[in-house]
């Protein structure tokens, strides 16, 4: 099992060591979107670095979680459990939530 807390700490330690941003959260969101755009382009162009680009997205998310003092592992587990309890129905060709957890 992956230890998200350890990864979050390693990511923030690396950002600090390299002098990267650890205070401007809106900038971190922009960087994360940029990485997601790069992953989409890698997918569309069938580039071999798609996995690396997806990893960059996760790294930015874990870094932001650490900056914001969010236990992302706990949040993911809670969200997965919540999603399992939700009910959906196809309405007009689209999946719509019909019951909240």
Image (cartoon, rainbow, N blue to C red):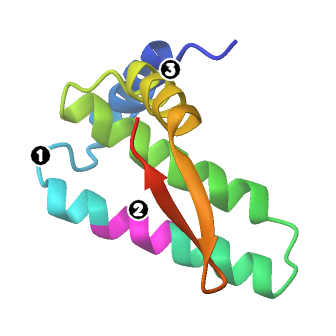
Residue 38 sits in which quadrant? bottom right
Is the Cβ of the residue at disc 2 closer than 8 Å to that at disc 1? no
Q: Quadrant of the C terminus?
A: top left
Q: Is residue 19 left or right of residue 46?
A: left
Q: Which residue is mark 1?
A: 23
What type of secondary structure mainly makes up the magenta span? helix
Residue 5 sits in which quadrant? top left
The crowd level at tag 3 (other Cα within 10 Å; few <14, some 14-19, many 20+) is some
Write the residue at 85% across / 76% down.
47
Upstream in sequence: badge 1 or badge 3? 3
Q: Which residue is mark 2?
A: 32
The crowd level at tag 2 (other Cα within 10 Å; few <14, some 14-19, many 20+) is some
Mark 3, secondary structure of its residue: helix
Single out the mark in the foreground, 2 or 1. Answer: 2
Write the residue at 50% across / 20% down.
4
Upstream in sequence: badge 3 or badge 2? 3
User: Which mark identifies residue 4?
Assistant: 3
Foreground residue, 82 or 27?
82
Do we see residue 34 in this rendering?
A: yes
Residue at far left of view: 23
Residue 18, horizontal then vertical, whole percent: 35, 41
């Amino acid at each position: 099992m992956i230890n998200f807390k350890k990864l979050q700490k390693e990511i923030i330690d690396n950002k600090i060591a390299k002098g990267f941003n650890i205070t401007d959260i809106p900038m971190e969101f922009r960087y994360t979107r940029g990485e997601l755009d790069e992953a989409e382009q890698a997918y569309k162009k069938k580039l071999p670095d798609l996995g690396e680009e997806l990893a960059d997205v996760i790294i930015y998310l874990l870094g932001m979680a650490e900056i914001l003092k969010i236990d992302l592992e706990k949040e993911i587990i809670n969200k997965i459990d919540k999603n399992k309890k939700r009910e959906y129905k196809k309405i007009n060709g689209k999946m719509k939530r019909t019951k909240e957890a």
